[in-house]
Image (tube, grey):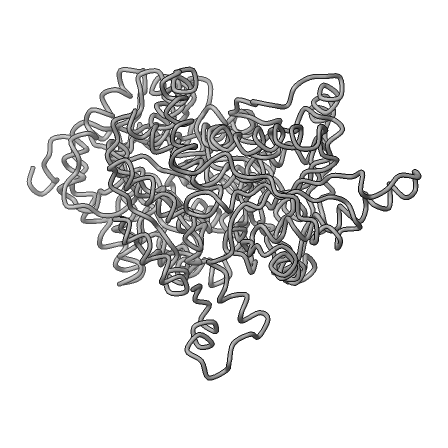
Amino acid sequence: MAEAPSGNAGNDTDNNAAEAFLQGGSLKHAPGPYFGSYGGRWMPESLIAALDELEDTFNKAKEDPEFRAQIADLNKNYSGRPSLLTEAKRFSQHAGGVRIFLKREDLNHTGSHKINNVLGQALLAKRMGKTRVIAETGAGQHGVASATAAALMGLECVVYMGAEDCRRQALNVARMELLGATVIPVTSGSQTLKDAINDALRDWVANVDNTHYLLGTAAGAHPFPAMVRYFHEVIGEEARAQILEQEGRLPDAVCACIGGGSNAIGIFHGFLDDPSVKIYGFEAGGDGVDTGRHAATITLGKPGVLHGARSYLMQDDDGQTIESHSISAGLDYPGVGPEHSYLSDIGRVSYEPITDSEAMESFRLLCRTEGIIPAIESSHALAGAIKVGQRLAAEAAASGGTAQDKIVIVNLSGRGDKDVATAAEWFDLLDKDSAESEIGKEGEQL
Amino acid sequence: MTTAQTTSKSAAAIDKARAEGRAALIGYLPAGYPSVEDTIAAGIALAENGADLIEIGIPYSDPVMDGQVIQAATTEALANGFTVSQVFDVVQGITSSTDAAVLVMTYWNPVVRMGVDEFSRRLAEAGGAGLITPDLIPDEASEWMEASDKYGLDRVFLVAPSSTPERMQRTVDASRGFVYAVSIMGVTGARTSVSTAAKDVVAAAHAAGADRVCVGLGVSNASQVREIAAYAEGVIVGTALVAAIRDGGVDAVAALTKDLSTGLSRSGLTEEEA
């Protein structure tokens, strides 16, 4: 991108919103379709009836004790919730000595936060009488989660995945097929995640009578951003209750990584109305935000419409979407959920880029200090937490306190088993003659 | 539809066809495929061989309503360096040489990026009739409603088999020029038969007060044109024309347009047959 940083300048409406927040107004449970000037429904008319049906079904389900009980039961007895809140004592020493706690979404069934959303949406699909779900996937995490939910609930599942990603992620393709899903390689456009979304939307237009589009992130047309957030709110609710129980106080900061932004909005939501809690979203800085090869949508993008919502967007001067780049497939998306754009504009959440190198250093650091292999996505949040921790430590020192009094919660959104080959290649851990080395060069994830 | 007080170029073109006892033919071409000059030449060929309105598409990186033929063409146009402002050259090139009404079909983000007012001003200056907006619904169109009024441009929204009566009414009320009836639930691309849903969508649009309803998606030959011309004010052909320019250049566009136009007569007969 050849554009200067936008600086996240707010307008009058946004200043009013920020003021309302400061005066005790709530930022929680924002219902959509608009978050400030973001969100909405920039979609073909053909799909509006399906979005209306979904919105109606979701609104009724939210108020239905039976639906809420179903979700609670699945979260507890299928996903394994509540996920733990683990203090990372040795890792914390590298973050200025503040205390870092990890919200362990990596311990959920299927290994990430994604399961929260797919179970909720699959239940809604059943309520609407749909027999088929479709999903997009980048590296395969949301595809695997969708295939899992579909298998559990007896739904047909079709996953759209960029042809290049299919080749690089052959084992995740096999996982989805083991779970009974059909994976369709996408060869249109740039053959990446955004094109997988395009093809899923084309499928949805043609098959909307029996098909639900199980969108994987808190983006897209209303009601998706508010609905996906709803299913992930459990992350923030648990984390807030856990830190109060374990430490008797709220954290000083909460950190999460941002691609589309679903894990982030889930944990942020629990703390939006706690003014003492600083909130940070870490975008994929790729090779660096000055190189043009990154996915730092809020940091460098401009507002536009893509995939149904108005939000920050990586685009050129003609409004054509720019391809994003990140070592983390899960963050490699040129858009971002509209609620994040709003939270940025009003100044409630700070969004900063983390480069591939910074993320990979934190990846290795967590492995070696805590015995936890994090997803590369989540490693962006870890790298950000180190920076935040050092700032908080400096503040504490300046005011005569100690870093030990500062608490930071990091959403560890997924486990890194899927990233072992990428990491082995990055750190040059493989014997050059080994079969794994060959696979690593191809980007295969073991 | 608010056509009374404006001089809608699209409405005038459709009404002229109606006065001749036939439906209007609307042909689609993507701008810059295979080159800007070719698009202008093909647009002129469309007009000279029986098209009453011409729809010029802006190649876009994420065309969710398009099937493979149009995707491939617009991807190639972008790869060849097409820039959005060249669409005004195409519109000007065609309107300065023909009487056809020329609309631009565009996904919304390129318009947002340029600025809705600026885009509208330049389109009007180039002689354009208005915009067809596949991913903009009236609910999100306040800026466009204002700009289209300011510059006297037609705003062609889409209605679909899935549109509820309330949405049909809202969309018909917001439209000017004509209403674009999507014949089937799906994306652009030639199909062997026209869905029966098309007739119902047109009837619903007429019932909601639309004076001019044109049917698109999946229409590729004269017999399909004839079928639709029996109940709609216009017939829109896209993919078949894109395949024609791809395979046979401007001459093939001219030949296909001539053939398609034989299906326009309300009587269901061509001039020769009559």
* Quarter where residue A374 is shown: bottom right
Q: Percent x, y for residue B115?
A: 60, 38
- Count the marks: how many? 0
**Which residue lies most toward the front here?**
A246
Please, is residue A364 above or below residue B100 in the view? below
Residue B54 seen from this side: no
Please, is residue B80 above or below residue A313 in the view? below
Please, is residue A101 above or below residue B32 in the view? above
Q: Percent x, y for residue A42?
A: 47, 33
- Of residue A423 and residue A31, the one placed in the foreground of this image is A423
Please, is residue A45 above or below residue A328 in the view? above
Q: Percent x, y for residue B106?
A: 45, 42
**Which residue lies most toward the left here?**
B273
User: Residue placed at 41% from the left, 25% from the top?
Assistant: B176
- Of residue A399 and residue A289, the one placed in the foreground of this image is A399
Q: Percent x, y for residue A309?
A: 51, 35
User: Residue placed at 72% from the left, 48% from the top?
Assistant: A5
Q: Quadrant of the C terminus of chain A?
A: bottom left
* Quarter where residue A191 is shown: bottom left
- Taking the image as shown, residue A340 lies to the left or right of residue B194, namely right
- Taking the image as shown, residue B217 lies to the left or right of residue A216, namely left
- Taking the image as shown, residue B167 lies to the left or right of residue A412, namely left
Q: Quadrant of the N terminus of chain A?
A: bottom right
Residue A199 seen from this side: yes
* Quarter where residue B69 is shown: bottom left
- Of residue A129 and residue A427, the one placed in the foreground of this image is A427
- Taking the image as shown, residue A251 lies to the left or right of residue A181, namely right
